[in-house]
Amino acid sequence: MKKRIILICLIFLLSQVVFAQESAQNVISIGIGPEFNMNSRENFAGGFVVSIDYKLPISAIQLAAGLTMTTSFNFSDALSFEVTGMVRWYFLRIKNLNFFAQADAGMHLIVENNISVVLIEGGLRAGLRMPIGDLFYIEPYGRFGYPYAWGMGVLAGVRINIPSKKNTVSNIDSIQQEEE
């Protein structure tokens, strides 16, 4: 048991070194968390969200694109699954807080009383991303749209920095020059 804990701590510490260099890299974010929404005819539904997004390499404005998958249950007879594509705009940064607006569009499957219905979904979302160090983040948000009316939740996630090919090539070139 102690060996497993030491191994997990070692991997965590090494990942901090690997992912700490964000300035010239691409960022993929993966988040999970709970959500409450109006995916029900009566009352509300509780659910679970998984989100993945990629920070687009546009220097003029801060944009991200990705996928969001949500499942929710109204605690009696309605179960829903959502898969949406999203485009996010980070429009304001105050210290370490990144405020965003997001547009979602995709498919929505509702299963109620053993009858399933597939609908087209569309909506808007607003929230803020609060980084925790260079690797993790917390993201509370609210959303509204069709067919769910409203939703609110919080994601906890990890940011994975991927070196760009440009930097990798220049790093290899500088290593080769040092060897000569």
Image (spheres, rainbow, N blue to C red):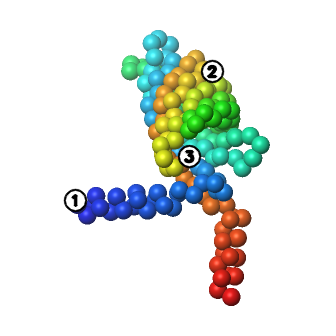
Q: Nearer the viewer, residue 117 or 130?
A: 130
Q: From the image, state whether disc 3 or disc 2 is nearer to you.
A: 3
Q: Secondary structure at mark 1?
A: loop
Mark nearer the N terminus (2 vs 1): 1
Is residue 1 rendered to the left or right of residue 86?
left
Mark nearer the N terminus (3 vs 1): 1
Q: Is residue 75 visible?
A: yes
Q: Is residue 118 visible?
A: no
Q: Identify the amino acid type marked 3.
A: Ser
Q: Secondary structure at mark 2?
A: strand
Q: Nearer the viewer, residue 155 or 112?
A: 155
Which residue is the site of mark 2?
145
Dot 1 crowding, Cα within 10 Å, few <14, some 14–19, many 20+: few
Which residue is the site of mark 1?
1
Q: Nearer the viewer, residue 134 or 94?
A: 94
Residue 29's mark?
3
The image shows residue 171 at horizontal and vertical percentages of 66, 71
